[in-house]
Amino acid sequence: MTGEASKAQDIFQDTLREAAFLAAKGEPPANRYWFFREARWRCLDVVAHGVQPEQRANESTEVSPQAPEQIEQLEPEQLAIWISAAPEPQRSGLALYYLDEFNYREMMSILGLKLNELSRALASGRREFQAWLNATVPAAARE
Amino acid sequence: MKRLSRGLRTLADCAPIANTKAPDRRMRTAVSRAKRIEGFAAQQSFDRAVAKLVQATPVTPEIQEWFANEKMAEGAKRNWRKTAFHPAILAIGIALVVIAVVAWIKFDEQMHAFPGTATAKKLLNVAAMTRPSEFEPVQTEAGTLNDLFFMKYRLEHYDVPREFSRQQTIGVRVFDDDEAGQVAQIGLAEKRMQLFLFPGRRDSKTGKPEEFEGWRYIEQEGWTGAVQARKGVLFMAAVRGPKKDLAPYLSKPKE
């Protein structure tokens, strides 16, 4: 989400420090989602004060049956860069969704979104990523 | 082509990447219906491919080290003591105890209630407010007063029970009460006790007096009364003090 491993490491450590501080005060985090919520807010804060990604064109297209072959040709870093440049809350939604560790209720809780907001973020994310894929890996798209 | 309802479409957009992970019935329904819709299979293939790419993201040993003690970050579990002393739980507990105590008091009152309880309590207040000078002086044994009540006031069956019949009186009075009717009040020399005789409550349908067996105690503002019903008349012995001050008179009937 931050686009930089060092910033992510700082956020990770700050989050753990905050959890330890709360635990020392006798108010430890109630569940593991607290860590994700806290880390996300810290990420958003860091991103807001850092270099902003270029506004990309909001082109979108329906998900193609050929998408898996197109995605296979990508490097993981390309996907990470694309997601980190997405606007909030789409960026956080896509990041959590494709980690494949949370169900939709847990994502709603972590992101503080309603179901229709989460659904919209994921659906538009897919379509926009497909459009970017078609532009980036056109050969595969035409197969 | 079939279409999904808006609600199911919303859920299907968030469908779990692995089919086995649907957290609830609504999601399982949405996924099951969406599978019949063109485009959902493409969405799932798309999601699986992206998730696979995410899983393939190389993780440096440095970052792997962060999660070496992943369980360290689990939320602390509350033990029963901590849960019990949580302010909300404590407040609910106290409230339940208060409700239980009030309910028990009410239940206990109902258990000890008898026909004429309200009147008897009212007469306990009368006993507390009556001064000896308000009595018509009569010094005799309480058991002999039934003739006086009958001859002078036409009060039938206003008999003092044998438990108190040998007690020396200091005076009597008869008065009308709105609720109780004609009340005979006797002042005793012993412990400044007072005796009351008044009509018992009558059944509204049959007109027969509602009676009960044995002695019943009532307490009001430091006064205690022992009440007995006989032949449609209630007798109450009242004393300033606790129940134990009256108990000896009731357990050992004086001959």
Image: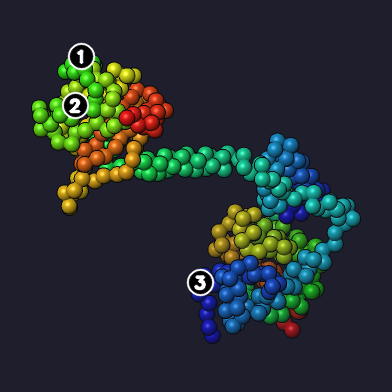
What amino acid is at disc 1? Ser
Mark 3–mark 2 distance (CA, rounded to whole Å): 91 Å
Please state, as top left, top right, bottom left or bottom right, where the N terminus of chain B lies in the image.
bottom right
Q: Would residue B241 be found to the left or right of residue B181 on screen?
A: right
Looking at numbered disc 2 in the image, what kind of residue is underneath it?
Answer: Leu
Q: Earlier in the sequence, mark 2 or mark 1?
A: 1
Chain that bears disc 2:
B
Q: For numbered disc 1, what is the local secondary structure?
A: helix
Q: How is the image coloured?
A: rainbow
Q: Which residue is mark 1?
A: B133
Mark 2 to mark 1: distance in Å?
19 Å
The image quarter containing residue A132 is: bottom right
Circle 3 is placed at which residue position? B6
- Labels 3 and 2: the sequence-earlier one: 3
Q: Using the image, name the chain to which the residue with label 1 belongs.
A: B
Q: Secondary structure at mark 2?
A: helix
Q: Nearer the viewer, mark 3 or mark 2?
A: 2
